[in-house]
Image (cartoon, grey):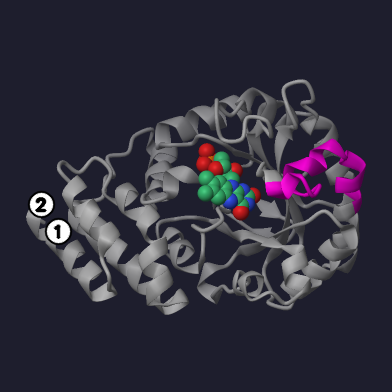
Amino acid sequence: MKIADIELPEKPLILAPMEGITEMPFRIICKRFGADLMFSEFVASEGLIRDAEKSIKKLNFQDKERPIGIQIFGHDINSLVSAAKIALETNPDLIDLNCGCPVKKVVNKGAGAALMLEPEKMAKAVSEIVKISDKPVTVKTRIGWDFNSINIEDIAWRLQDAGAAAITVHGRTRSQMYTGEADWSVIAKVKNNPNIHIPIFGNGDITSGEVAKQKLQLSNVDGLMIGRAAVGNPWIFKEVKAYLANSQSDFTPSLSERVEICKEHVAMSVDYKGENRSLLEMRQHYAKYFKGVYNFKMYKMRLMQAQTIAELMEILDEVGEAFNV
Ligand SMILES: Cc1cc2nc3c(=O)[nH]c(=O)nc-3n(C[C@H](O)[C@H](O)[C@H](O)COP(=O)(O)O)c2cc1C
């Protein structure tokens, strides 16, 4: 399948943008295990315009990550256009507009999911970005603001008309935040609407190959986006691909592989953002990398308290040895 001229495999698997998680080191690992398309974490348009270090850093990627999109968010159309221009200077494969972030400090300013309350403005933002972009412009959004205002079908049509090259639909409303279940029947309605011709990707609650297959059968979407289930488990892309191909997947990473990938993630993170930030920020990953490992708690505590990367790596080696890798 294709997004504009970008060639992707049939039913591609996409790594969801996740702030604080899908930085370059984690993306490189997910790519290795089969992510077909990836996005940066969301980047504040206002931050890009003001040359804020945090925002500029999020534009970093390596060629081996391609195809890759830079995701921007904001409420002011002029700022979004200026931010898209800055992002395009790094030569990504596409630009994505975030219209799904539910977080208060984002929606209170009229950005993220708040744009679902202003479909005309959302479409205008897309058409203005399309005008200045030599790369396809995509949108990631939700099914509506709340259960009384599920308007994704109307929005999808407007976005297509505005020149969006593809849309990813997270099957929750803004008011659900990350609770409850993603409603794939609404995603299916968008995908199967005869007026929609651009690719529609589905997102929400894909946790295994089996679930991925069910969601595909239910919705017939053009590709699947996976977020939380990839954290500490980048192998999920391999597992889902095997399951979609054979309706079975006996792929489970060995403990030694988990130790090895976690160490590699730490090492890349140190290169990318230094020892201190890595010590802090890698903490959210350990419990996920070693989920289900009997008696891991004690090691987790030590990993959380490690004062240096050398100490951290030693503890990870011990994890491998303790569990007889
Ligand atoms: C920690 C975290 C950070 C996120 N950051 C972003 C983001 O920067 N941009 C975005 O479009 N969605 C973001 N999301 C939403 C995910 O991309 C995805 O839509 C959501 O997690 C549902 O998919 P899942 O059930 O596969 O996790 C974030 C989600 C989480 C849990």
Nearer to us in this view, 324 or 146? 146
The residue drawn where x is 81% and y is 43% is 115
Q: Secondary structure at mark 1?
A: helix
**Disc 2 beta carbon < 8 A from ligand 1?**
no
Q: Which amino acid is tagged 1?
A: Gly
The residue indicated by pointer 2 is 323
Is residue 118 depicted above or below 20 in this figure?
above
Residue 209 lies in quadrant: top left
Quarter of the image that includes the C terminus: bottom left
Instruction: Return the x and y of residue 182 as percentages of the image width and height.
Output: 58, 29
- Asked if residue 74 is among those painted magenta in the image, a careful observer would answer no
In the displayed structure, 51 sits above or below 322; it is: below
Q: Main secondary structure of the magenta part?
A: helix
Amino acid under label 2? Answer: Phe
Residue 321 location (% of width, % of height)? 9, 59
x and y percentages locating residue 120 in the rendered image: 92, 42
In the image: residue 261, left or right of residue 206: left
Is label 1 in contact with label 2 (beta carbons under 8 Å)?
A: yes
Pinpoint residue 196: horizontal percent, then vertical percent: 80, 37
**In the rendered image, which residue does mark 1 sit on?**
320
Magenta range? 105-124
At horizontal 20% and vertical 62% (from top left) the residue drawn is: 316
Residue that protrudes farthest toward the top in the picture: 148
- Label drawn at residue 252: none
- For label 1, the crowd category at 10 Å Cα-Cα, with few meaning under 14, some 14 to 19 and many 20 or more, is some
**Residue 120 covered by magenta stretch:** yes
Give the left or right position of residue 178, taking residue 212 as reference.
right
- CA gap between label 1 and label 2 equals 6 Å
Can residue 11 be seen by looking at this rendering? Answer: no
